[in-house]
Amino acid sequence: MESRTAGTGDHLVEGILFFLRVGFPAPVVTRRMGAGHLPGSGPPTPAAPGRPSRAGEAKEAAEGAAAGSGAAGQARGGFRGGAKMAAEAVVRLQSDWDQVLRKNEGEAWLSCRSPGKSTLYGTLTCQGIGSDGIPEITASEEFIVKEVTKKSLLVSCPRENASTRFLAPYTAFCRIHQKSVTCLDISSGGGLGVSTSADGTMKIWQAANGEIRRRLEGHVYDVNCCRFFPSGLVVLSGGMDAQLKVWSAEDGSCVATFQGHKAGILDTAIVDRGRNVVSSSRDGTARLWDCGRSACLGIVAECGAPVNGIALGDADNTLNLGSPEAIPSEREIGTEGKLLLLAREDKKFQGVGLQSRQPVFLFAGSDAFNCCTFLSSIYLLAGAQDGNIYQLDVRNTTAPVRVIQRSGAPVLSLLRFKDGFIASQGDGTCFVLQQDLDHIVELTGADCDPVYKVATWEKQMYTCCRDGLVRRYHLSDL
């Protein structure tokens, strides 16, 4: 535990320490706040000296040929069962289309690429701005503009039977960090954001306007990952200094430090209300921690390769998670029935019983895995360095239910969203795939810069990018 000088904030720190021992209360959520934030698995993050990280490789890929390296399908029409989807066409649009097409006769390029066929190219042209402020847009041959709002366009390519709705950011925060923003999260109430950057800083800010509230200082070297506890009052972070830290979101003080990993921490997960947390590291392990005592309760998995991302969820009751070899510590709270997913550098995607520490499945992919998430207690997603997104049925992981690939750029984050998911990639691609939509929703604005992480609150989405911007999107703009 870190020492600190007594002062006016001591009562706050004592309160946080109390809740670390007994668990944070569930956040109070009004009807206006809705269901709250769905935390995703963390993104690949800066690596230890001497070895490029997944994020570093993503930068190289975005600068090279990854953006155009073939699409293997956009997987429409549901996520439950069925064979792998056939390859489908992908529609692309100029990243700053919303600015260009607000000028009379302004033009933006678009394309439609279908695997094995010549790419179709075209343009969208602004024919003027209506009295309601919505531009009148026409498309060149081979494309049709179906719907237009101030911040969104629905474009189709009838020849390839492909449609995509492009959503422009409502606003972009440029003053939070000076360099690449590598991770972010939004509090359960939607009022605060926390983010880390390649400029070496971690900051808490107002989600509405990006105004900085606190600077969280204490890690040595880069901070790789950050997330809010369910209360929204406390932040958990992991860094290249192999330390986990717990912070007060109200006064910015560090109230606990966990040490035990032998290399940089790449991702974290919070168990229930937060008495226990899980971390993954470049040292090849995932560890379970007791927040109240700042102590490691055990190594959940030893993988022999860096664990780039993790996700924690309730296992389907038909799944055998195994039995622990020893009686679990009384300090383990909420670990029973939990499945821990591990996205591994050695091209393996693994499931482990959190309480039992027993392996549940091990799936071999085509490249290093960067991130993972739960679609449900049965269906899982894992994103790989080669752009593949694997959907697995946890009851039978011999072969994937389907493989989705919209570009060959690394998949950097995955987040469950409603009845589908959000994915971000190393070429600036960030898309939403849902069962009830017959088209992809693509979040635009990043121009070939990796989008490292996505967070949501109600109808708002936040992304962080190598270009140093945090972008906020309103789904109501659809």
Image (tube, rainbow, N blue to C red):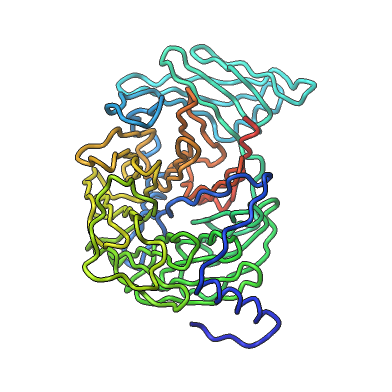
**Is 57 positioned to the left or the right of 230 in the image?**
left
The residue most toward the right is 131
Q: Quadrant of residue 326?
A: bottom left
Name the one closer to the observer, 411 or 318. 318
Q: Is residue 388 left or right of residue 470?
A: left
On screen, 125 above or below 456? above
The picture places residue 32, in percent across and down from the top left corner, at: 69, 44
- Rendered location of residue 311, percent (x, y): 39, 53
Location of residue 284 by image quarter:
bottom left
The foreground one among 117 and 107 is: 117
Q: Position of residue 216 (x, y in %)?
A: 58, 70
Q: Nearer the viewer, residue 220 or 339?
A: 339
Label count reads: 0
Residue plotted at (29% across, 27% down): 82
Q: Is residue 39 above or below residue 388?
A: below
Q: Relative to 174, is 354 on the left or the right?
A: left
The residue shown at (51%, 33%) is 442
Q: Quadrant of the C terminus?
A: top right
Vertically, is 83 above or below 195? above
Left or right placement of residue 72 versus residue 192 in this view: left
Residue occupying the point 44% across, 71% down: 244
* Residue at left offset 55%, top offset 36%: 444
Q: Position of residue 146 (x, y in %)?
A: 58, 17
